[in-house]
Amino acid sequence: MVDFAESSKMPRLAAPVLPKEPGSPLERAFAAPVGSEWHRLDPAFTRYRRILAALLAVPVAALGGTAVGMWLHWAVGAAVAALVLLAMVVSWATAERTRLSWGYAEGDSDFYLTFGTVIRQLLVIPYGRIQVVDITANLLEQALGIATVQVRTAASTADMRIPGLRLVDAAALRDRLAERGETFPTGL
C-alpha cells in the first residue's frame, strides 16, 4: 500500500494494519474465556530471555567465529560471529513482545493458555485431564524470582508449560490446578 500524502515525489510505504476492534475474527479466536481475562507473565521474564540470549550468543560467536576462521578463512569466521550476534540482537529486541504474547486464564471447567508471536496458539485443557502440576526454576530463574509451571495431562501431546511466573504466583497456580484436577471428573 502506498501513501502519497507526504510528498508526490517520495511515496511512503505503509504496512497493513491488522484489525484491533473487539469483534475481529483474530481477536475472537484468541480471546480469554467469558468472565475472565488473560494473566500475563512477570516482567522479569523479559530480563530472563535477554540474559539467556547473551549468555548463549557471546560464547558461540567468539568460539564459533574463531573455529570457523581458523578452519576456513578469517572473513568467514567474522561473518559467522556477526550472524550469531545479529540473532542475539533480534532475540533481545523481541523479548518483551514474546513475554506479552504469553497468557493464561482459568475458566469454569477448562484451563486456557495462549502464546506465540509469529504463530499464535491457544491451548484449552479440561481440568479433569490434569494429572501432574510441577514447578521448576533453573539458577537464572531463581535469581530473578520466577519459575515455570508445567502441567501434564492424560494425553502426552497436551502437556503445557507456563514460564516466567513469579514464585508466589506459580505456587498459587499449582495449588489451584491440582485442586481442580482432583475435583473434576477425568473425562476418559
Image: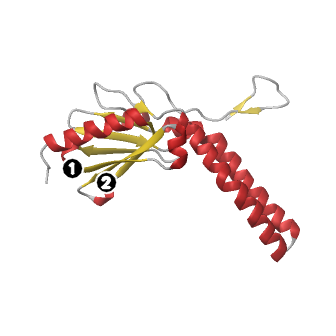
Does 165 sit left or right of 64 as displayed?
A: left
**Amino acid type, callout 1:** Arg
Report crowding for label 1: few under 14, some 14 to 19, many 20 or more residues within 10 A (C-alpha): many
Residue position for label 2: 158
Residue closer to the observer: 119 or 166: 166
- Residue 133 visible in rendering: yes
Does 162 sit left or right of 143 as displayed?
A: left
Q: Quadrant of the C terminus?
A: bottom left
Cα gap from disc 2 to disc 1, whole angstroms: 9 Å
Whether the residues at callouts 2 and 1 have beta carbons within 8 Å, the answer is yes
Q: Is residue 101 above or below residue 153?
A: above
Q: Is residue 26 above or below residue 155?
A: above
**Amino acid type, callout 2:** Ala
Q: Quadrant of the N terminus?
A: top right
Estimate the x, y position of residue 136 in percent, counting from the top left: 41, 48
Residue position for label 1: 129
Image quadrant of residue 16? top right
Does 80 sit left or right of 17 as displayed?
A: right
Q: Residue at x 44, y 42 (%)?
A: 147
Estimate the x, y position of residue 4 in percent, counting from the top left: 75, 27
Colour pattern of the rendering: secondary structure
Residue most extreme to the bottom: 71
Q: Residue at x 48, y 44 (%)?
A: 116
